[in-house]
Image (cartoon, rainbow, N blue to C red):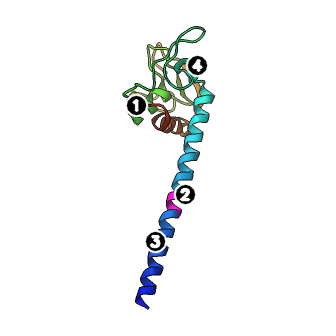
Amino acid sequence: MQAQFAMAATILRLTVGMTLCTSAFAQDAARLAAGEAAWDKAGCLQCHGSTGEGGVGGEFPAGPSLRKTRLDRAALVEAVSCGLPGTQMPGWLDGAYTQRSCYGFPPGPAPDGTTLTPILSANEVEALADYLLAKIVGR
């Protein structure tokens, strides 16, 4: 009887573990799909290339290679959200600077030389950072 109970408990643990792994995989896949959708929505490929290798100029400004970036997740979120003042990298977060602090400054007007294109939500920016780290950065 104890052997049957132990076997049933082991099967239950394996089933729960597999269910959690499958659920986590589905959530990760959905998150990456949302990040790719944000990449497309913001038109990141116009400056960074279709696979993040860096732009080549032409009609659009050349953006740096995201494959070679050393930015961590937090820095990617900040750069996508708030842009990079003094460069052609715009801030994509709706409410950047005015409703959300950027680079430690209190909410207010964006610094001179900052372009804002507020079309992404905070969730989209976060998903985009996850997508970049999973599919582009270091690849």
Q: Which residue is mark 4?
A: 46
Question: What main secondary structure does the magenta stretch of the protein show?
Answer: helix
Foreground pick, 116 / 20:
20
Q: Secondary structure at mark 1?
A: helix
Q: Amino acid at mark 1?
A: Ala
Q: Is residue 101 visible?
A: no
Cα separation between marks 3 and 4: 48 Å
Which comes sooner in the sequence, label 3 or label 4?
A: 3
Cα separation between marks 1 and 3: 39 Å
What segment carries the magenta color?
19-23
Q: Secondary structure at mark 3?
A: helix
Which comes sooner in the sequence, label 2 or label 3?
A: 3
* Disc sitting over residue 75 in the figure: 1
Which comes sooner in the sequence, label 1 or label 2?
A: 2
Q: Position of residue 76 (x, y in %)?
A: 44, 31
Looking at the image, the residue that sits furthest to the bottom is 1
Cα separation between marks 1 and 2: 28 Å
**Labels 1 & 4 near each other (Cβ < 8 A):** no
Foreground pick, 43 / 81:
43
Specify the quadrant that holds the N terminus.
Answer: bottom left
